[in-house]
Image (cartoon, rainbow, N blue to C red):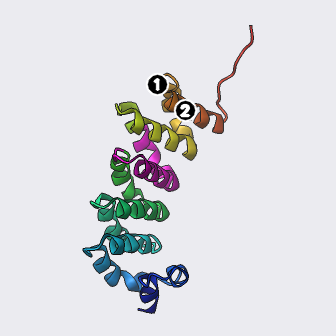
C-alpha cells in the first residue's frame, strides 16, 4: 500500500507522485477512506477514486457527490468528470442546484467532461428549470459540449429572461456554426 501511504501523507510531492500509482487494488482502502469521519480524508479518497476507471471506483465515488462537506463534494464532482461515466449525470444535474455557485459550476464542468451522455438530460433540464442560476450552468454546459442535438434548446434559450443564459445559448450556437446573422438596414 505504498501508493496510498504517499497519497495520504500530506506531503505535496509524495501525493503528486502517488496519484499515478493508485490502482484498483487500492479500492478496499479507498472505500474505507471514503467513509472516514474526517472530511479531508473523504476528499482525498474522492480524488483517488477519480483516477481509477472502474465500476467499483465509480460506485464508491457517487455517494461522495452528496457529502455534507463542501470540499468533499468539490473533489467528488471533479473526480466524476474524470470518470466520464453516464451514471454520474443524474447526481451532477442535482448538484447544479447547490447553494454554492462554485460547487454548481464544478458540477457543470464535470457534465461538460462527461459530454455526449449528458446532452439529453441537460436539454430536458434546461427546458424545465425555473432557477436562473441553474439555467445558466445548463446552457453553459450545452454550449461547451457543442452537441448538435442541443441546437433547438439553445435557440429557445435565446429568449430566456436571463442575459447569461442567452449569452451561453449564443456561444453554443456559434460553436456549432449556427450563430445569429445580423443585417444592417
Quadrant into which the N terminus falls: bottom left
Q: Are marks 2 and 1 in contact (CB under 8 Å)?
A: yes
Question: Residue 79: x percent and y percent?
Answer: 44, 65
Question: Residue 138: x percent and y percent?
Answer: 45, 40
Which image quarter: residue 121?
top left
> Is-magenta flag for residue 122?
yes
Q: Which is more toward the observer, 153 or 105?
A: 105
- Most common SS among magenta residues: helix
Q: Which residues are magenta?
A: 97-124
Q: Which is more toward the observer, 99 or 28?
A: 99
Residue for badge 1: 160
> Is-magenta flag for residue 184?
no
Secondary structure beneath disc 1? loop
Distance (Cα) linking label 2 and label 1:
9 Å
Residue for badge 2: 169
Question: Residue 135: x percent and y percent?
Answer: 42, 35
Placement of 87 over or under 102, stated as above or below? below
Question: Residue 120: x percent and y percent?
Answer: 43, 42
Return the disc, 2 or 1, that comes first in the chain's sequence.
Answer: 1
Secondary structure beneath disc 2? helix
Amino acid at each position: 500500500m505504498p501508493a496510498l501511504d504517499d497519497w495520504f501523507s500530506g506531503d505535496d510531492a509524495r501525493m503528486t507522485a502517488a496519484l499515478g500509482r493508485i490502482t484498483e487494488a487500492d479500492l478496499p482502502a479507498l472505500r474505507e477512506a471514503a467513509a472516514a469521519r474526517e472530511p479531508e480524508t473523504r476528499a482525498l479518497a474522492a480524488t483517488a477514486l477519480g483516477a481509477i476507471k472502474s465500476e467499483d471506483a465509480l460506485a464508491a465515488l457517487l455517494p461522495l457527490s452528496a457529502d455534507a462537506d463542501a470540499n468533499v463534494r468539490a473533489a467528488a464532482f471533479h473526480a466524476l468528470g474524470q470518470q466520464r461515466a453516464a451514471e454520474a449525470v443524474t447526481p451532477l444535474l442535482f448538484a447544479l442546484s447547490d447553494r454554492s455557485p462554485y460547487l454548481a459550476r464544478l458540477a457543470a464542468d464535470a457534465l461538460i467532461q462527461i459530454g455526449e451522455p449528458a446532452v439529453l438530460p441537460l436539454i430536458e433540464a434546461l427546458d424545465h428549470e425555473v432557477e436562473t442560476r441553474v439555467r445558466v450552468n445548463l446552457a453553459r454546459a450545452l454550449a461547451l459540449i457543442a452537441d448538435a442535438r442541443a441546437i433547438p434548446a439553445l435557440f429557445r434559450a435565446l429568449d430566456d429572461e436571463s442575459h447569461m443564459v442567452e449569452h451561453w445559448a449564443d456561444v453554443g450556437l456559434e460553436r456549432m456554426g449556427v450563430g445569429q446573422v445580423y443585417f444592417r438596414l
